[in-house]
Amino acid sequence: MKSFLILEDGTVFEGTHIGARKEIVSEIVFNTSMAGYLEVLTDPSYAGQAVCMTYPLIGNYGICRDDMESKRPWPDGFIVRELSRIPSNFRCDMTIQQFLEDNGVPGIAGIDTRALTRILREKGTMNGMITTDNDYNLDEIIPKLKAYTTGKVVERVSCAEKYMLPGTKELTENGPLSGSSSFKREDFEAGIREKKPSLVRCLSGAGLRVALLDLGAKDNIAGSLAARGCDVTVYPAQTAAAEILADAPDGIMLSNGPGDPKECVTIIEEIRKLYASDTPIFAICLGHQLMALATGADTFKMKYGHRGGNHPVKDLETGRVYISSQNHGYVVDTDKLDPQVAVPAFINVNDGTNEGLSYTGKNIFTVQFHPEACPGPQDSSYLFDRFIEKIKTKSNSSTANN
């Protein structure tokens, strides 16, 4: 079946329909990752967007539920050059086609995704429509595209009620150290699930309680903390700061999430109250932006954003460069940053935009990129250990003062 991708500038791509038979209007973005399409599909940060994968062949290992970052796909639509309909992976639970159909996500294949990416890079991210209507009318469609906004999407992707993920009690529960794992077809078919390789070498967070504010959190954020021994309580995005603080967590995490950070007005107010506490805080992606807004800084929309698994970021304290996974269309404006409140801690090597902040006189640090990235890169996973050390430092200081 024919399908059409129509951009708000009037550009039309003709391809083949994939996924659910459904028409959608969404913000069109691109991701440059060469692997990890399942993690992209199940990342709640893509809610309100249709994502184009720049790698030409997508779906060759199908859908492996054990690798999902949430329980369902979140993009409004999926755009690929070629969709593999016969996956080659014994861990595969279903094809991408079936996954998209089952979850009501339409898509288009067979278009020149590099040409689409070039348009988005040159003109900036724009809205678009995926439709199977051969009789589409541009004069009617383009005004609809120009009027579309992602709106308040955080409420859509956050958990409905708080829940707890207990920390690992024995290091062996995490699985073998990275590089020493193997997946055997015979074991898999017999129902034996070997654990994924782990980078965690000690349970440094054992006994610590961490509150995670779910703004659209990928599962591996809580998983990265639990793997280090932390007991993690996950709270819905609209939870009042007073409720979180009343549970007396040792540390607080603010997760990733979708949309324009300035839409999260009430959440920003509650984060301001969390900032005023003495509790150590670590924030990722949207959480990083919301903490900046809560403390008087500003954010702005980027031309086409950073989305992919190959973005270099520089730690300004050590000078080291890490390859990171990223998915954001907004960034903190460092020109409007008060150094008495926060100073830049990481920058993007490619374009010099802000990738992290260290808060002056507070046990708070935030990053724009994803240290919990799965399948990777995992260069910056050490930041979870840094967070745990900040919690312990705060705890030891409080004990000494008492």
Image (cartoon, rainbow, N blue to C red):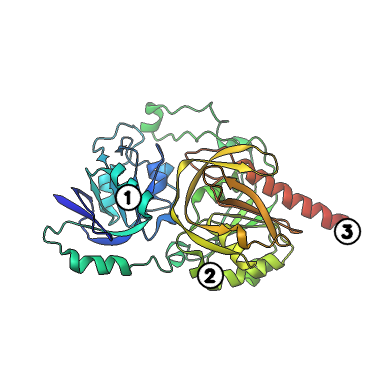
Describe the element under mark 2 as helix, strand or loop. Answer: loop
Type of amino acid at the residue the image marks with label 3: Asn
Which circle, 1 or 3, is nearer the viewer?
A: 1
Residue at mark 3 to residue at mark 2: CA–CA distance: 34 Å
Q: Are marks 2 and 1 in contact (CB under 8 Å)?
A: no
Q: Can residue 228 be seen? A: no
Give the mark nearer the N terminus: 3 vs 2: 2
- Residue 119 marker: 1
Q: Position of residue 157 (x, y in %)?
A: 44, 61
Q: Is residue 401 left or right of residue 61?
A: right
| Residue for badge 2 | 238
Q: Is residue 161 above or below residue 11?
A: below
Q: Is residue 198 above or below residue 265?
A: above
- Residue 401 marker: 3
Q: Is residue 126 left or right of residue 18?
A: right
Q: Position of residue 268 (x, y in %)?
A: 58, 69
- Residue at image x 32%, y 57%? 76
